[in-house]
Amino acid sequence: MARSGLYKSDVKNARDALIAQGKNPSVDAVRVELGNTGSKTTIHKYLKELEEEDGVAGVGGKRASISDALQDLVERLAARLHDEAEERVAAARQEFDAKTSEHGTALVATKLENSKMLARVQEVEAALEQQDAELASTQTELQRESTARQVSEHQAADLKERLAENVAYRRSLEEKHQHAREALDHYRNSVKDQRDADARRHEQQVQQLQAELRQAQQTIAVKQEEATRLNRDGARLITELTHARQSLSTEEERTKRQIRELESLRTMAARHDVLVAQMADRDAQVHDLRQQLAVTGEKRDNLIDQVRGLDQALAQANARADAQEAVATQLKALLAATKEEE
């Protein structure tokens, strides 16, 4: 590359300095003397103009002119090869940098997408763990409620059995009460009949009636005591019947409460089924996210393979540039050997 502000006087000063040092003022030597600045083509042009101006003739006649021309050709060819190699390497580097930047951006986006997917997977897994805990709690509660339901059903069966016994006992009490009423009515009817018979026979059998009357009074006293006892038994039976009806009402209320508890258990079982269905849906979502993560991983691997391909292309370009530099070096060595032979 030409240095900005390179003049012929600069080239002349560098050439004169080399000649004063006893060195050959070649294009490369002059460029080194200038501080590795300036284009080799420009330096060669200025050197040629200076040679024409100075009228310097090559030592050794015609062979020296051919050698100088060959050296000039080799140097120009080497300079052109070097420039072309640098341009190709720069273009390759620029293309590589562009593709590397593009792939880096895509890779960053892919990593970001992977991070988002991983975060979402973690959220879904956390939700699944929470649902598992809720399901375990629900199952435990359902098991506890199922045990309570079994106990309640057993208690309900016992209560139904006791209710049947109470109903049978109540019927027995009612039958006894009915029998007592019938016995009392029968006694009253018999006493009335007996009194009527005694009254009809009163005039005919006064003495016998008095004796029978005393006996009847004694019998009436006994019967009255029996009637009183039967009345007390009837009242006690009625009280027991009232208590039995109250117990029956209490047991019916408890049975209704247990039926409501059974309905609550059925509702909880339905909720358990809904939770199981929701867990199946979450499992399907996790499966889809994992498939998307695998596809993203494949894209990332493809990008890495492309970056590796670009690295290989850059290495090949550098190898070609090194080969061109080697060819230029060999040409310079050949030129140097030709000069030594001359």
Image (tube, rainbow, N blue to C red):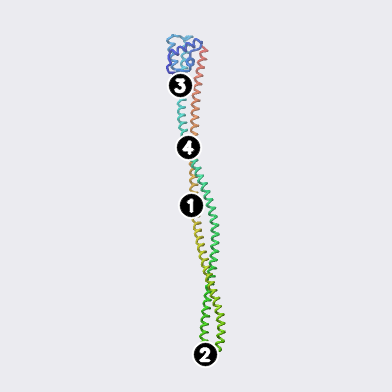
Question: Could you say which disc has been placed on residue 112 in the image?
Answer: 4
Query: Mark 3 and 4 residues: CB-CB less than 8 Å, in contact?
Result: no
The residue at which mark 3 appears reads as: 83
- Along the polypeptide, which appears first: circle 1 or circle 4? 4
Give the structural element (helix, strand or loop) at label 2: loop
The residues bearing labels 2 and 1 have C-alpha atoms spaced at a distance of: 98 Å
Q: Nearer the viewer, mark 2 or mark 3?
A: 2
Q: Tell me the amino acid under the disc marked 3.
A: Asp
Residue at image location 49% in from the left, 53% down from the top: 271
- Residue 215, percent across and down? 57, 84
The residue at which mark 1 appears reads as: 274
* Quadrant of the image containing the N terminus: top left
- Residue 94, percent across and down? 45, 27
In the picture shown, does residue 171 fall above or below 341?
below
Q: Residues within 10 Å of mark 1 (few under 14, many from 20)?
A: few
Q: Pick the residue in front: 202 or 187.
A: 202
Query: Mark 4 and 2 residues: CB-CB less than 8 Å, in contact?
Result: no
Give the structural element (helix, strand or loop) at label 1: helix
- Residue 107, percent across and down? 48, 35
Residue at image location 46% in from the left, 25% down from the top: 90
The residue at which mark 2 appears reads as: 203
